[in-house]
Amino acid sequence: MTDLQNSKSKKRQFVTALTFGRAPLILLAAVSALCHSYRPATGKLAAVILLMALSALTDLFDGLLARRWEVVSRFGALADPLMDKIFYVATLPVAVFLAARLGDWQHAALLLVLDVVSMLRDQWVSFLRSIGTLYGADVRANWSGKLRTALGFPVILAVYLYLGLAALGIEMAAVWHHLVLGAEVVLVVITLLSAAIYSRDYWPHLRRSLND
């Protein structure tokens, strides 16, 4: 192996580690949020926000570095959406629990809708990607998936901050409550839009598979 190949291999390994590092960070954030819910403490809430922020940064930098170092791969194109799914699977059910524990049933119901819509969208898109790979389709995330991720990370971080402050007994102005709920509604709409766009893009492959 030449020095150039060795350097690229190490860079690819680093990018892959950065991508997969997102999972433990977000799982730790979810566990910390649950601990904070039972025994509220400012330090625990700070840990939750820090871990979620670090998770978001891995999502930002793994793609940037992969393109800058020219180590973009089909494996990375599939691994990145997988880590995004883990993010939603770990954070949204816990957020529903946190809101319900605070007695905020309206908020819990909206978060439950977001959770269900997200899971259905992710399963459907994974199915479409599986069909697409049979016919050599480009399975990288499209603009709607990237938009959903770019919006999803800060919205869910804001939700955890809002619920975490409520657990500490810090009352927020009504406007912040409405802003958080509004952001969640927007995320539901973006998630549904993303599912529709993926369906449109993969429809030729899906139709072909039905006829094979």
Image (cartoon, rainbow, N blue to C red):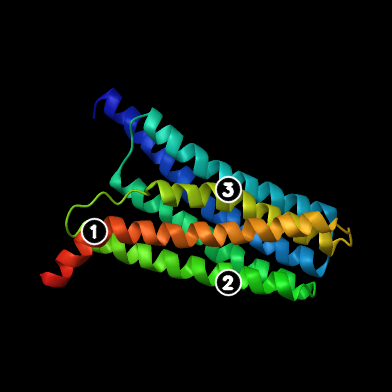
Residue at image x 80%, y 70%? Answer: 38
Question: As drawn, is 145 to the left or to the right of 45?
Answer: left
Label 3 sits on what residue type?
A: Ser
**CA separation, marks 1 and 2?**
28 Å
Residue at image x 57%, y 46%? Answer: 56
Q: Would you say the residues marked 3 and 1 are in contact, meaning their CB atoms lie under 8 Å apart?
A: no
Nearer the observer, disc 1 or disc 2? 2
Instruction: Return the residue at label 3.
Output: 55
Q: Is residue 20 above or below residue 185?
A: above
Between discs 2 and 3, the one toward the N terminus: 3
* Residue 36 on image: x %, y %: 78, 63
* Residue 167 on image: x %, y %: 83, 64
Nearer the observer, disc 3 or disc 1? 1
- Per the image, label 1 sits on a secondary structure element best described as helix
Q: Work out whether residue 44 can be spotted.
A: no
- In the image, 200 versus 157, the foreground residue is 200
- Per the image, label 2 sits on a secondary structure element best described as helix
Q: Work out whether residue 60 can be spotted.
A: yes
**CA separation, marks 3 and 1?**
29 Å
Question: As drawn, is 154 to the left or to the right of 84?
Answer: right
Instruction: Return the residue at label 2.
Output: 113
